[in-house]
Amino acid sequence: MLIPSPLRSLCAGAAALEVAGATLGEVLRAVDARCPGFYERAVEGGRVRPELSVALNGHAFRYGLTEPIAPADEVTIVPAIGGG
Amino acid sequence: MPRRAHIQTTLNGEEIDFLCEPRQSLLEVLRDELNLTGTKEGCNNGNCGACSVLMDGRVVNSCCVLGVEAEGAEVVTIEGVADGETLHPLQQCFLEEAALQCGVCTPGFIVAAKALLDSEPAPDEGRVRHWLAGNLCRCTGYDKIVRAVLKASEMEEVSA
Amino acid sequence: MTTIEKPGYKVIGTRPIRPDGVEKVTGKALYGADIHLPDLVHGAVLRSPHAHARIASIDTSAAEAMPGVLAVVTHTDLPVVSDTVVDMGEGVSTASDMSKNVLAADKALYRGHAVAAVAATNVHDALSALDAIAVEYEPLPPVLSVQDAMREDAPLLDESRHTKTPAGELSENASNVAAHNRFEGGDLEAAYAEADVVVEREFDTKMVHQGYIEPHNGTANWNSDGTLTVWTSTQGAFAVRSALAELLQLPVSRIRVIPMEIGGGFGGKIGVYLEPVAALLSRKCGRPVQLTMDRTDVFQATGPTSGGHMKGKLAVKDGKITAAEVSLAFEAGAFPGSPVMAGAMCMLSPYEVENFKVDAYDVVVNKPKVAAYRAPGAPNASFCVEQLIDELARETGADPLQFRLNNSAREGSRMITGVAHPRIGHEETVEAAQSSDHYTSPIEGPNRGRGVASGFWFNAGMQSSVIASVNPDGTVNLIEGSTDIGGTRASLAMQLAETLGIEYDSIRPTVVDTDSVGHNDVTGGSRTAYASGQAVYEAGLDVQQQMVARAAQLWECEAEDVEYAAGALRHKSDSEKTMTFAELAGKQMETGGPLQGRGTVMARTPGAAYGVHVVDVEVDPDTGKVDILRYTIAQDAGTAVHPSYVEGQMQGGVVQGIGWALNEEYYYGEDGRMENASFLDYRMPTSLDLPMIDTIIVEVPNPGHPYGVRGVGEVPIVPPLAAIANAIHDATGHRFTELPISPRRVVEELHNLQ
C-alpha cells in the first residue's frame, strides 16, 4: 500500500507499507491496524468515500471493498477527479 | 395586460398576422406566440447573434427588434432557410464540415451567413470572419464554421 | 516519430454526418427553453444585490397578492438536508451546501445568489412580483480574493467552517480555507542545492466562465400522484435526478428527468440551479413551471471556474527537472469545492519530477460557487508550471519542446499521487509538434514571438449503459443516456456500427430520459466517447452472441460452429450457410422474438490525454493588442472515432483558452459586484479574432478501450494560457504572470505604467 502523502501523518510518515489482505477492504483494515484512523479516512458507509478513488496497479477506479487483491498488487488512494 | 397590437407580416414567405404586446421583442413573438423556437436566445441584448433573423434581407438580432416593428416587413427565420426537404447549401455544408457541436448558435450563424452569400456570393476568409463577428460560438473555435461558409459559397446553387 | 500500428477499421476514422445534424441546422431540435407544455406558467428568481449579507427576513405576502402570481418560494420551502456528500459524477458537494446555493438560507454569499422565486401566468408578471418581495439584508464586508480570504482577520463566510486535511485534522480557528492538501516526495532541499538553475515566480488568474451560448433553464411538473417530471438542458440527466432526490428528499423512482438538447456546457451544466426551484413552484401552484436565466444571471449565479494565486519554484540539473515546489490557492466561490486538487494532480503529469512539494488550498470567497469547466483546475495550474518550464528551457539554452521531451513522463512514470502512468502518448505528441510545419517554419518580424506548452488531463471512467434494439429491417436503435453536446450520438453510433460490422446509417441513436435506460453518468470528464463507447461495444457483442445462437438454431448446429464477422454470420464448415445481419434481423419473430443487446460498464479510468500546443503571436506595443497569428495543436486522441469532431473539440478548447489568456475575466468592483456581466463586456473570442486552428491528431491507442479511444474534450484548454504567455514573452521579453493578458495590462506592464 502506497500511503498518499496527505495521509502520512496517520502512518508516522511512512510512504509505503506492506500489508496482507485478500480484498481491498482487508488491505485497508490491515493498514488501519498499523495506522489507526486510516480506514475511517478512506471508507464511509461501507464504500470508499465519494471524494476518493483507489488506484490499483496504476488504475484509479471506484473499486468496491470486495475487490480481490493479489499478493504483489500496488494499492493507493487518490482524490477522485471528474471533469467538465 | 397592455393592449395588443395586430401585426401583419410576411414570415418565411407566408403572409401571416399575429397579436403582440408593444413590449414584446420579435424574438419573444417568434418563440412564444408563433412557436418558431429555431431562433435562440443567448443574451437578449444583441451581443451573441443566436437570435439572428432576416428582416427585409438584412440580418437583425430579433431580441433587439420589437414584434410590432415586423409590420409590413418580410421576415425569414431558420425555419424558412431550407426549401422543403432540400437543405440550403449552407445547411448541407455545416453538416458535412462538422461546423456545429452543441448546435444552439447554428441557426443564427446560418441565417447570418445566408445574408452574406445572398449579397456577396464569393467572399474570402477575411470577409466571412468579419461578417460573422456578431455571432458567438463557444464550441467550435469558428474554424469549421468559416470553412463551411466558404464551401457553400463555392457551390453552384449559391454562386449562380 | 514512433510508428503506431493501427487496425483497419471500417467505420471508425470516417467522417459521416451526425444523426442529429439535420434537426440542428433547420431549427427543429428542441433545447430546454423550447419546450411548451399545456398549462405552462413562467417563473422568475429574486437575487441578492449584496455580495455578502445576513438575511434578516423575507416577506413575500405582497408579491403573493399580486395579479397573475401563483406561487412564491424561499429557502424555507426546501426540506432540511444533511451534510451527506452527493456524488454528482464531476466532483462532490454536500447536500446542505447545494441546498443553500439553490436558495439562500440565512446568508447571501454572492451577488446574484437566489433568494426567492415567483411563478406567474406570464414572465412579465413574475418579474414585476419580484419587486414586491421585501428582503431585509444586513450587509457584511465581502471577501473577494484568496489572499484576502486567507488573512487571519478576514470576514468569514461561514463561522463554523474550519480547514480540513485529508487525514481528518481540523484547524483550530474557523477559516475561509475549506481544505488543505499536500503532496510530497523526494528531497526538495537537496535538489535545489544541487541545481544548475532555479526559477521562482508568483501567478494570478481571475474567475472565467464557460460561456455556453444557451442560458440555463428548467421546467418542472409536480404531478398530482407525487411524481416529478423535469425537462432541462443538462450534461447529466441522472446527476440532476440524484441532486433533486437529495434536495427535495424524494426517492429517485419518483423523479423523471428528460434531457433536452443542450446548448453547450463545458462542465457548467452538471449542477442544478433552476430545476429544484421550478419543482417547488410547481408543487405549490399545481401547474408546470418554466424558469430560464438571462445572461446576467448566468454570469452572476452559475458556476464559473476559479481564479487564484499560485507560487512555483522549479529547478533543473543537467537538463532534467529535478525539483518542483508549487502552492495553489483557488477560489471555490461561496461554497467549498474548487478544482484545486485536479490542477495539482495535472500540472506536473507531463513530466518526471522526483522531488516535489505541492500545496493545494480550497478557499471560499464571496463569488458564485465554481462549477467544472473543461479540465477544471488544470489550465490555471499549467499557466504557472508551463511558464516556469519555459524559463528553465531558456535559461539552459534548450529548445522548449526538446526540453519537454527530455523530461517527459512515460509508461511507468509516477504522478505526484504515487500512481504510475499506464501507456501514455506525451512523447509522441511532443514529437508531432516538433515535426509540424508550424514549428519547423521560422517566425520573423518585430513584436512577434512563438510559445509552446504541454497539457495533461484525465479521462473519467464511471457508469454508462445502453440498449441496442435490432429492427426487422436490419437497422438498430441505440438507446443511450449520455447528453450529446458535441457529436456523441455520431461517435457512439459509429462504434456500434464497427462492432456489428454494419453501416453507420443503420444505427439510429436516441438519448432518452432517466426512466428509459440504466444509469449514465454525466457527459463530462472526457468520458462519453470512451466510457459510453465501451458500453456500446458490450451491447454490440451481446447482439452478436444472440445472433450466433439464433443462426445455430436455424442451421441446426452448435453455436461454436457459427462465426460472426463483418456484419454477417456463417457456418464455419459449411460455406453454403451464410446470412447477413439484416437477413437474420428479419427473422427475429421465428427465432425467439425481439433481439436486444445491452451494455453496461463501470469504466476503469485509463491513462489519459496529452496535448502540445504551438502558437505565434504579434504584440502591438502601442495598443497592447495581442494577435494570434498561427496556432497548432497536437493531441493524443488514442483512436479518433470521428476525426472532424475530434478536431472540433481541439479547436474549441484552444479558442476558449485563447479567450482566457487574452481577455476573459470576472471584473469585480470593491462592493463585490461583477461589473462585466454581459457578452459585450465579458469579451469572448469572435471569428474575427482568430486564425484557422491547425490540428494534428496523434493516435497512441488507449489499452483500456476496445478501439483504443481516449477522451479528447478537455485537454485542449490546458496549454493555451501558458503557450500564449510564453509566446508573448518571446515577442516582448516580458513575462506576464497575471491573467488576462488584456491590451490594458500589456500596455501598463510594457510601459511600466502601473
Image (spheres, rainbow, N blue to C red):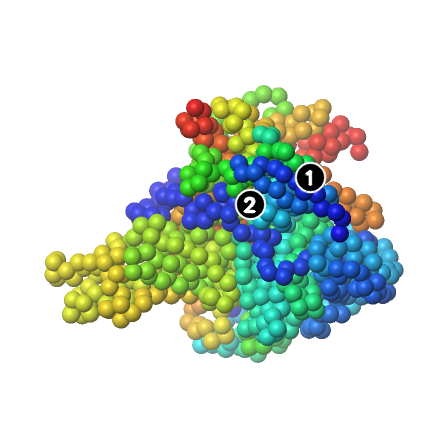
Name the N-terminal-most of marks 1 and 2: 2
SS for dot 1: helix
Co-location on one chain, circles 1 and 2: yes
At which x and y percent is residue C742?
Answer: 69, 35
- Quarter assignment of residue C172: bottom right
Of residues C477 and C52, the one nearer the viewer is: C477
Residue located at (47% from left, 66% from top): C516
- The quarter in which the C terminus of chain C is drawn is top right
At which x and y percent is residue C530?
Answer: 44, 55
At which x and y percent is residue A19?
Answer: 50, 74
Question: Dot 2, crowdedness within 10 Å: few (<14), some or many (≥20)?
Answer: many
* Amino acid of disc 1: Val
C691 on left or right of C119 = left
- Determine which of the numbered discs, if any, sits on residue B17 in the image: none
* Amino acid of disc 2: Gly
Write down the residue under mark 2. Answer: B38
Q: Are marks 1 and 2 in contact (CB under 8 Å)?
A: no
Of residues C114 and C642, the one nearer the viewer is: C114
Tell me the chain of label 2: B
Count of numbered circles on the image: 2
Residue located at (59% from left, 56% from top): C36
Give the CA distance from mark 1 to mark 2: 20 Å
- Quarter assignment of residue C576: bottom left
> In this picture, is B110 found above or below C148?
above
Write down the residue under mark 1. Answer: B68
At which x and y percent is residue C398?
Answer: 54, 34
Tell me the chain of label 1: B
> In this picture, is C378 found above or below C581?
above
Q: Is residue C551 visible?
A: yes
